[in-house]
Image (cartoon, rainbow, N blue to C red):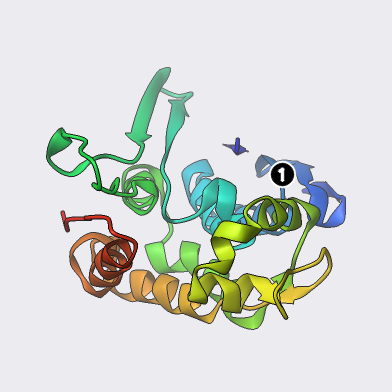
Amino acid sequence: MILVVAACGGSTDNGLGGFQGVGSEGLISVVDGRAAFAARDALALDGTAADAAVAAAMVLAVVDPAAAGLGGGGACLVHDSFNEETQLLDFLPATPGGGAGRGTAMVPGSVRGLFMLSHKYGRLEWWQLIGPAARLARFGSLVDGGLTGDLVAEAERLRGDRSARAVFFDKGTPLATGSDISQLELSATIGRLARNGAGDFYVGAVAGALSRGAEAIGMTLQRR
């Protein structure tokens, strides 16, 4: 997943398949239109490109969880055109203590990285940026072809997880393109992060739920 945002409008939209916008406020290029709209709204609130990227990434965590879920990580290049400086934020998943071992789960880096991007380079409040993703997860969105393909490819594994089966399957069959999907647990998680900050994902209630989930599949995930 590659997301590009430049803050400096007109726009073009092809529905669920992607969005590109350009104008006096900035340019956005995202694979999913819903994520791009969240980024556009952040720019419209006088947010920076970093704000727009965080807003888009959180929506992608809802609509494209296989590529951009909260359980993953990534890296971000931030260019300051005024000072001609480019910084790399590396928030790839890490093993607690730096040592990988059998049965040790990687600690997700996405939430920490997005929070740092917002804190260092943004102007808007953290809750403003991730609120749209929480609402989208709660009130539902349409399943696109990419998500359907991911569900079909991993259908056998996902059927073994009761929570995944309840969200992503209909009568034992992966959700079809165009189906409506609501993710109430994900919405509640993002809502907690909006209220309590990113730390809740690593040392708070969300961290506890992640640790218990890892234990349920025979893995160890330490709080950080």
Residue 11 place in picture, x, y as percent:
82, 48
Quadrant of the rendering where the C terminus is positioned: bottom left
Residue 79 place in picture, x, y as percent:
46, 26
What residue sits 53% from the left and 81% below the top? 184
Q: Is residue 7 above or below residue 17?
A: above
Quadrant of the rendering where the N terminus is positioned: top right
Residue 136 place in picture, x, y as percent:
62, 73
Say which residue label 1 marks. Answer: 31
- Residue sitting farthest toward the top: 84
- What crowding class fits label 1: few (fewer than 14 Cα within 10 Å), some (14-19), or many (20 or more)? some
Q: Between residue 18 and residue 205, name the one nearer to us.
A: 205
- How many labels, in total? 1
Residue 183 place in picture, x, y as percent:
57, 76
Residue 7 shows in this picture: no
What residue sits 48% from the left and 72% below the top? 186
Q: Between residue 161 and residue 41, name the one nearer to us.
A: 161
Residue 127 shows in this picture: yes
Disc 1, SS: loop
Looking at numbered disc 1 in the image, what kind of residue is underneath it?
Val
220 with respect to 70 (left or right): left
